[in-house]
Image (cartoon, rainbow, N blue to C red):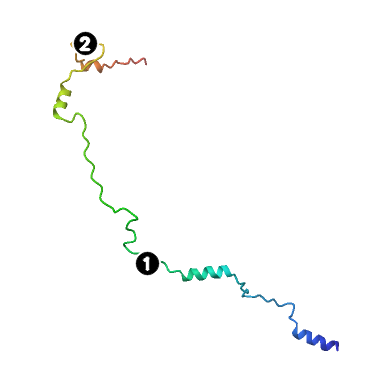
């Protein structure tokens, strides 16, 4: 009797050395996620028309070219009057001012060699 029970158990029992891995996990129902996915799939984007932007943005127009600025002293009369002016040096009378000699400006003293 004992041997009969052992045979019956051994036939129905799973051997201990075999492993069974489940490849599919039972899906749990998530009502909110299902509703969300259903609405996402059912959504149809509205078609875009060329007239949809009217009233939302200003129409584009080419900007005006800037005007040339007017500077003081650009007239020929002003330029010639400026060139004709006498040079004023502070502390010296206008008649006493003379042109310095160019040679006086470039005086180079010779260096004596002590070697």
| Residue at 19% in and 28% down | 73
Q: Give the residue at mark 2.
A: 93
Give the mark nearer the N terminus: 2 vs 1: 1
**What percent of the width, then of the height, locates residue 39?**
50, 69
Q: Is residue 74 above or below residue 108?
A: below
Question: Badge 1 local density, few (<14 within 10 Å), some, or many (20+)?
Answer: few
Q: Give the residue at mark 1.
A: 47
**What percent of the width, then of the height, locates residue 86?**
18, 18
| Residue at 48% in and 70% down | 41
> Looking at this view, is 24 or 42 the one in front?
42
For discs 2 and 1, the disc positioned in front in the rendered view: 1
C-alpha separation, residue under disc 2 versus residue under disc 1: 87 Å
Q: SS class of the residue under badge 1?
A: loop
**What percent of the width, then of the height, locates residue 3?**
84, 88
| Residue at 34% in and 61% down | 52
Q: Is residue 97 above or below residue 24?
A: above
32 horizontally vs 18: left or right: left
Quarter assignment of residue 76: top left
């Amino acid at each position: 009797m004992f041997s009969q029970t052992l045979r019956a158990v051994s036939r129905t029992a799973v051997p201990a050395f075999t492993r069974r891995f489940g490849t599919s996990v039972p899906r749990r129902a998530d009502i909110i996620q299902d509703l969300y996915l259903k609405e996402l799939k059912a959504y149809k984007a509205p078609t875009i028309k060329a007239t949809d932007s009217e009233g939302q943005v200003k129409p584009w127009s080419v900007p005006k070219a800037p005007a040339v600025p007017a500077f003081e002293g650009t007239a020929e009369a002003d330029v010639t009057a400026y060139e004709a002016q006498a040079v004023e040096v502070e502390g010296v009378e206008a008649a006493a001012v003379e042109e310095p000699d160019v040679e006086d400006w470039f005086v180079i003293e010779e260096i004596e060699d002590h070697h």
